[in-house]
Amino acid sequence: MDDTSPEPGLRIRPDPARLEEGWERRFVVEARRVQEYVALYESTGYEVCADPVRPEQVEDECSGCRLILLLDYRTIYTRRPR
């Protein structure tokens, strides 16, 4: 895990709407690194979305996860072009 990833063990649920649309959640990363990962996945032929982490995605029992909401993190989703 690189230094931009949230703490190990954080439990952030994927967006069910994204999953239904065929997106695969890859990871959660600081917003300052999003463009780097978007460019990497796009260069390999993927469509990419980077969504902000929303409060309802954070597991209730994960109080440390709430810090993610105060910081600027995004969830990276990818899918093959249709």
Image (cartoon, rainbow, N blue to C red):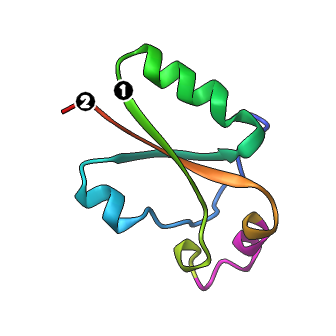
Element type where label 2 sits in the image: loop
Mark 1 surroundings: few (<14), some (14-19) or many (≥20) residues within 10 A: some
Q: Position of residue 8 (x, y in %)?
A: 68, 54
Identity of the amino acid at label 1? Tyr
The residue wearing badge 2 is 81
Q: Position of residue 52 (x, y in %)?
A: 61, 58
Residue at 25% x, 54% y is 21
Magenta extent: 60-67
Give the distance between the C-alpha atoms of the residues marked 1 and 2, in whole angstroms: 6 Å
Q: Nearer the viewer, residue 21 or 64?
A: 21
Q: Is residue 78 left or right of residue 59?
A: left
Q: Nearer the viewer, residue 36 or 4?
A: 36
Find out whether residue 23 is within the magenta segment.
no
The residue wearing badge 1 is 46
Residue at 65% x, 36% y is 34
Visible residue check, residue 7: no
Q: Indicate whether 6 appears above or below 79.
A: below
Q: Are marks 1 and 2 in contact (CB under 8 Å)?
A: yes
Residue at 61% x, 63% y is 53
The picture quadrant where one finds residue 9 is: bottom right
Identity of the amino acid at label 2? Pro
